[in-house]
Amino acid sequence: MPKLTTDDVYNTCYLCGCQAHYISYNSKKMRCVEKITQCPGFIKKAQASRDANTTPEERKAHMKRMSENGNTKLKKLHNDPVWLANKSKKISNSVERRGGHGGENNPMFGQKHKQSTKRKQSTKAQHRDPKCYEQGIETKIKKGIATPKESKSAWDLYREKVENITVKNWKKYHDKINPNNLLRGQEYELDHKFSKTMGFLNNIPPEIIGHYANLELITKNKNRSKRIKCSITITELYEAIKS
C-alpha cells in the first residue's frame, strides 16, 4: 500500500472523510489508514451491516461459538512444547527490543493516560456488577490458577494486602516516593524499607508496611541483596508516617 507523498487537504478518505494518508493500489481510492479495516468509516459501515443482517441474540450465539472454538484450539496449543517455546521466545525478544517493560521503545514510554480516559475506566469499574469479580475468582479456582482464601496461609493473605496497598500508594504518591523520577524496571525496583516479612513477623498492620513513607526506589542489585532485611527501624517508620 503506497503512502501519499504529501498530505493535501483536498485528499480525504472515501469512507470517513478524514485526511487521507494512503491511496489504494488497485482502486486508487484515498484512505485515512493503511489497513482499511481500521478506518472509522469502515468500522461504522460494518457495524451497520451486522445490525441489519443479524439480531443481537444471533450475534451473541455466533461470538460464543467463535470463543469456544478459539479456546479449544488454544488449549491444544498450550500442550505443545514447541509452540510454547516459540511463543515465549517471541515475547522475550519483544520485551528486549523495548528495553524492558518500561523501556524507551515501549509505545507508552513517557506518556500518561488522559484524565478523561481514567474517569471513563473508573466509572466502568464502579458500575461493574460485583458478581463479575466473584465469577472470575471462581473460574480461576476451578482451573487451578488461583487458591481459595480459606486455603491460603496467614503470610499469603498478609502479603496480598500489603501489595494491594502498595500498588495504590505507588499510583497516588508517585512523586513523593520517586522525586528523582527514576525509571522503574530493569535498573530500579520498588522496595519496602521495613520489609514485608519483618512486618508480618512483628504483627505490623499492612497499611503501615504499604504506606508511601515506607516505599523507595533502589537499584535491583541492592534490593536483591537486601532480601528480608530492613533499612529503617519500625520506630523510624512510624515517625516518618506521622511527619
Image (cartoon, rainbow, N blue to C red):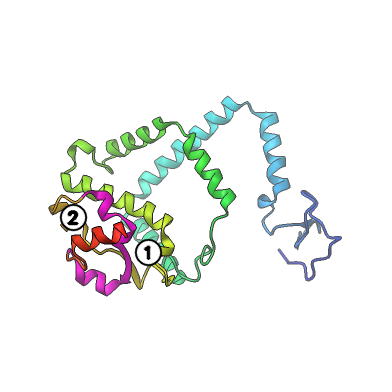
Labelled pair 1, 2 in contact (Cβ < 8 Å): no
Name which residue lies at 55% across and 45% down.
119
Image quadrant where one finds the C terminus = bottom left
- Amino acid under disc 2: Gly
Question: Above or below — where is 145 with respect to 7?
Answer: above
Q: Report if residue 45 lies within the magenta region.
A: no
Are there few (<14), some (14-19), or many (20+) residues within 10 Å of tag 1? Answer: some
Where does label 1 land, which residue?
177
Q: Is residue 150 left or right of residue 75?
A: left
Above or below, 86 relative to 51: below
Callout 1 amino acid = Ile
* Whole-number angstrom distance, CA of label 1 to CA of label 2: 19 Å
Q: Which residues are magenta?
A: 205-228
Q: How many numbered marks are there?
A: 2
Tell which circle, 1 or 2, labels the residue nearer the N-terminal end: 1
Residue sitting at the far front: 243
Look at the numbered disc 2 and give the secondary structure of its residue: helix
Q: Quadrant of residue 215?
A: bottom left
Which of these two is toward me, 52 or 210?
210
Residue 103: x and y in percent read: 45, 70
Write the residue at 16% across / 58% down.
198
Residue drawn at 60 percent across, 27 percent down: 56
Foreground residue, 76 or 11?
Answer: 11
Q: Which circle marks residue 199 in the picture? A: 2
